[in-house]
Amino acid sequence: MKRIILMMAAAVGSAVAMAQLQSPDQFLGYKIGTRYTPHYRIVQYYQHVAKEMPAQVKLEQYGESTEGRPLLLATVGSAENIANIEQVRMNNLRLANAARDRMAANENGPAIVWLSYNVHGNETSSSEASMMTIYELLNPANAQSKEWLKNTVVLIDPCLNPDGRDRYVNWYTSVLGKNVNPQPIAREHREPWPGGRSNHYNFDLNRDWAWQSQVESRHRIKKYNEWLPHVHVDFHEQGINEPYYFAPAAEPFHEVISKWQREFQTMIGRNHAKYFDKNGWLYFTRERFDLFYPSYGDTYPTYSGSIGMTYEQGGIRAGLGIINEDGDTLTLVDRALHHHTTGMSTVEITSQNAARVVKEFRSYFNNAINNPIGEFKSWVIKNDGTDRITRLKELLDRNQIDWSWANGGNLSGLNYLTGKSESFKAEKGDIVINVNQPKGNFIKVLFERTSKLSDSATYDITAWSVPFAYGLKTYGVANYITAVNKTATENTAATFTDNAYAYAVKWDGLNSARLLSEVLQKGIRVRYAEQPFHIGTEQFEKGTLLVTQAANTGKPVRQVLEAAAKNTGTKIFPVASGFVDKGYDFGSDRVRIINAPKVAMLYGENISSLAMGELWHFFDQQLEYPVTLTSANDFIREGMNKYNVLILPDGMYDFFSKKETNEELKAWVRRGGKIIALENAVAQMAKTDWGIKLKEDEDDKKDHDKKADYSLLRKYENRERDDLKNSMPGSIFKVELDHTHPLGFGYPDFYYTLKQDGNIYEYIKEDGWNVGVIKKDNYVSGFTGSVLKEKLKDGLLIGAQDMGRGQVVYLADNPIFRSFWENGKLLLCNAVFLVGQ
């Protein structure tokens, strides 16, 4: 009788739990997939789950998006594991040798799975699926999931990009009629610019994991590195005519990826296939989505010891339903169900192999520390005194990469700039990074000069080497280096004096430009030196900023500069006299006034929202200088008399093909305006009469009609491979720089550019300056097709052209790509503030 009573009590308890924990359909009042769920309602559902199942769920807000929406992480597990969740987390860090407490690790801990949803805002099915998944993991009637949670902890981030998601969901809801229209040409399937894929600043958050330029990424990676899960899934959507993609990934795999990481991807894929086969759902594996570029939601976890994977459901622009090319109606209900299925399957297969998953995770980090891959055991980054070294330290710290100060001493290693081995002296203040640490594999990936490609058909850029991106002289060393801990601090505070004649600021990085931005906005008059000068033992290079008391009579010069120096971390030099020891005195016409530019930037259809977003974020969050985003029509109609700088981001501009508008723009430049054209905007100007011309390759010059061209007889099955010879997904080239021109101030006589297309230009012959050029053998790293590699030499990439009283600046490549190409940011500041003054 007692046993019967206990069984009845258990059944009643289960029924009560079921009644309290509502399914998403019950809580929302509609079936998942029949309507879109706005982010605040997703948050409310997760709060409901945490409230009703406190013994098995821990819900935390780990940050906010740019627009103030909460970023959530739900930790789901058995009651026992959740009760000891901090011990579980710390033990896992000990397994990775990443804990600071030096305590012994227990290899019998649970496996940890992290599920990330909706990093691309308009790939909406995954956040809907996340609610289905957390419910089923906790559903008291689900005996399977109850068993899985005994040895597996599941972390769920329901929406990595709530701003982008709500942008899409709110738009879609606003254009939806009484009934869903599944026709692909219907308005509800034609999302307007810029779309919901990106975040507030139009950044692709799935390319930002390593760099963390965006606030959402910084919050998430901080939390991620507090856990270091064993398995990570990044849920996405792809085109409507693609079915479903899941692991294993396609080649190329980076060489640091372990045999187990490859093997378990296949095991996971086979488990998914079991469910998809049963339901007759189409899928594909081992195609398109590789594991190479380090800043994705699959590669960043992979290089951090996880089994990192991308799952892709067909469905971009599908809305609630759309007819695909097979004639089938693809619904949000189906898309959410597919993502829910792979999410549950991932937890299942991980639970079934939990002991080995944990063991192999520990082995990954042991090997990273004791048997690192690659020729270098350490790197020395020379401290050039610029803020780029500070930004590098910030990058390392955000990614929990251990670094130290050099102790001094003579060493030998590979000079990244020359590609040659040589002797060098490590000086105090240089940064040392040893690879024998938990993030050792990730360090190798970030710092390798050339990455080995097992397959040149890759999904993203193939070169990103941090020393080139930051413009810092770096040596790869074959041995470990003894260094000192991070105890040194830099003192950049200025010693202000009341009787200073002027104040000087060296022009050597973004912080200098940030200071200039701040003081110009406070109404302070600033000059810059066109030539180097010396005062005592201190040398000041071209571009040095000068603020004289005489030019700012009655203005709080000292207070403004003190505040700006503190805000930007910039060192200011008080100067007692305008009479210099070497060079031109401060009253010379070689010392020019900087008039505060009034900057406008075009946005809208046919302009890359990502490129525009990078520039917007740069002005708004980094440079902190006002920029007005405007359409081409509005600028031409109303803006020409209000602005003297116009930025053209990568895009297609109709007005270049319209003679009247084109001439209006030229007239504006001649009156004193300045155009800063980037990427494809330059290519379009080269096709019209703007004084710059695309350089043709040899194939363009040949007359193919003279004889049979057998190269046209290609095999259809080789079409993708054949196209690679004209492909360049992202490679690094050395640019010879004229650093006597204001566009090159603050640089040595070279610069490294990240090139993503084959555009190169003829040298400017009249009224202009060939500031940055590629010569022969200037290729550094990354995949470049044979045709383009031959073409990319002896041509222009960075130029400035005089036109009447105005100028045009040509930047063929993106100098601030994804905001991680730090060394190009000063180039853009030169274009904005110095050129044409």
Image (cartoon, rainbow, N blue to C red):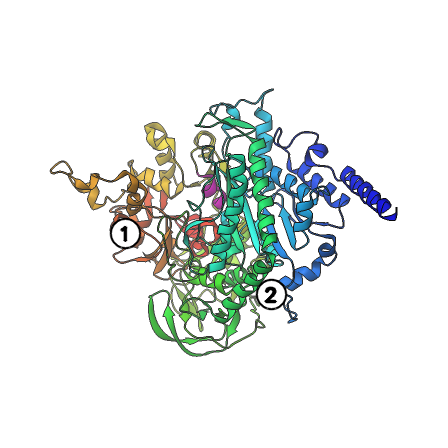
Circle 2 residues within 10 Å: few <14, some 14–19, many ≥20: many
SS at circle 1: helix
Say which amino acid is labelled 2: Leu
Using residue 43 as the reference point, say whether residue 250 is left or right of it.
Answer: left
Q: Which residues are magenta?
A: 608-617
Q: Amino acid at mark 1?
A: Lys
**Residue named by callout 1:** 789
Q: Horizontal and vertical percent for residue 833?
A: 44, 50
Which of pointers 2 and 1 indicates the residue nearer the eye? 2
| Predominant SS along the magenta part | helix
State the image coordinates of residue 425 (x, y, percent, origin top left).
41, 76
Q: Residue at x 35, y 36 (%)?
A: 666
224 left or right of 55?
A: left
Left or right for 581, reference 693: right
> Does residue 493 lie above or below 158 as drawn?
below
Q: Residue 678 location, x and y as percent?
A: 39, 44
Q: Give how far across and how far down residue 422 sits, in percent.
A: 34, 74
Is residue 191 in sight in this rendering? yes
Name the residue nearer the viewer: 260 or 411: 260
Residue tagged 2 = 95
Q: Residue furthest front?
A: 1
Residue at the far top: name it: 178
